[in-house]
Structures are given as structure tokens and as C-alpha cells.
């Protein structure tokens, strides 16, 4: 979605704010429980033009479900129908990068099971029920705090190549 596509009555969600996550689009303003922002302060890609304030970038846009919700309900994220969601490129932490630098294997895969355990595989695993299965007995349980962006819901495991691209 682009800034020029926003219409009065739509609701936006900020990327990462603690006090006011949602705001109503009204004329040239985003009006929320914590105050307002000027729409003109945003670039066409819905990022705030001021550097250092990325938490106020727009992460999602909704329309209101007309089921008789109050304005307070709407500004608390209720009665909303998703129109657009920003797809964020995952980022490696310092710890993730350090882990990758210490793996000497040519190829490997990392995946997270339904119970949030994280595993390293040397052959591509396959997914069934609530866990990833190794082709051979080649998996290692690794620190589950690493690679926080890797989720059970992912369609495929992350390969070494996938992860190295994120570190560039």
C-alpha cells in the first residue's frame, strides 16, 4: 500500500509503539489515543521521513468492520479487517552472525519445531505434524533464543544461503 492510497476512515497500525498502536486516517492526520501524526511527514512507502523514529512507520492498514464497534474499540485494534501488512526482511542479530561464522559445514538448514525448539540440520529436513524431521540422524538442538524470526509456521527451513543473504 502507498500513502496516496489511504482513505478517510481507514486505520493504520504503527510498527512498534507502546502507547498508541492504532490510528484513524482523518483528512491529513493519523489520530490515535496517544495523539496525532501528520500524514505529510510520511514517505509514499508509509515510512516516517524522520530518521530514528522507525517505530512510527506504518506496519499495517485496515478497514473498519461495520459491526457497531466504538471508536475506542477501533483504536484498540478491534473490529478491523486487514488490507495490507508490511513484509519485513528478517535481520540477523550479532549473536546470530557469530553462530553462523562458527559453522564450518558447507551446507546446513535451521528450523524451529512447534514447541519452539530450534535445530540445525546438515541435510534438508521435512515437516510433519508438530516438528521437522531429519533425513538422517543429523540434527543438533541449538539455543532457541537465536534466529527469533524463524517460526514453526515457516513453509521451509532456512538454508545457509538464505541466512547468509540476511547478513549482508
Image (tube, helix red, strand yellow):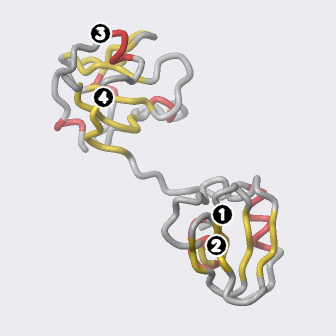
Q: CA distance from mark 3 to mark 1?
A: 40 Å
Residue pictured at 36% horizontal, 9% vertical: 72
Q: Which residue is mark 1?
A: 112
Q: Secondary structure at mark 3?
A: loop
Q: Which residue is mark 2?
A: 132
Q: Nearer the viewer, mark 4 or mark 2?
A: 2
| Tag 1 near tag 2, CB within 8 Å | yes
Q: CA distance from mark 1 to mark 2?
A: 8 Å
Q: Is residue 71 left or right of residue 59?
A: left
| Disc assigned to residue 74 | none
Q: Secondary structure at mark 2?
A: strand
Find the residue positioned furthest to the front: 129
Q: Earlier in the sequence, mark 1 or mark 2?
A: 1
Residue 149, position in %: x, y? 60, 55
Q: CA distance from mark 4 to mark 3?
A: 12 Å
| Tag 3 near tag 2, CB within 8 Å | no
Q: Nearer the viewer, mark 1 or mark 2?
A: 2
Instruction: Give the image quarter of residue 36.
Output: top left
Q: Which residue is mark 4?
A: 80
Q: CA distance from mark 4 to mark 2?
A: 34 Å
Q: CA distance from mark 1 to mark 4?
A: 30 Å
| Vertical comparison of 28 with 55: above or below | above
Q: Which residue is mark 3?
A: 70
Residue 100, position in %: x, y? 75, 71
Amino acid at each position: 500500500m502507498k500513502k496516496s492510497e489511504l482513505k478517510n476512515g481507514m486505520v493504520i497500525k504503527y510498527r512498534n509503539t507502546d502507547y498508541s498502536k492504532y490510528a484513524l486516517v482523518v483528512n491529513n492526520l493519523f489520530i490515535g489515543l496517544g495523539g496525532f501524526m501528520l500524514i505529510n511527514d510520511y514517505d509514499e512507502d508509509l515510512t516516517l521521513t524522520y530518521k530514528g523514529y522507525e517505530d512510527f512507520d506504518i506496519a499495517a492498514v485496515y478497514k473498519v468492520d461495520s459491526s457497531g464497534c466504538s471508536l475506542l474499540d477501533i483504536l484498540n485494534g478491534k473490529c478491523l479487517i486487514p488490507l495490507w501488512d508490511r513484509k519485513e526482511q528478517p535481520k540477523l542479530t550479532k549473536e546470530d552472525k557469530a553462530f553462523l561464522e562458527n559453522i564450518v559445514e558447507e551446507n546446513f538448514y535451521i528450523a524451529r519445531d512447534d514447541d519452539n525448539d530450534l535445530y540445525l540440520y546438515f541435510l534438508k529436513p521435512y515437516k510433519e505434524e508438530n516438528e521437522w524431521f531429519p533425513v538422517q540422524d543429523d540434527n543438533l538442538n541449538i539455543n532457541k533464543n537465536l534466529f527469533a524470526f524463524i517460526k514453526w509456521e515457516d513453509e521451509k527451513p532456512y538454508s545457509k544461503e538464505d541466512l547468509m543473504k540476511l547478513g549482508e
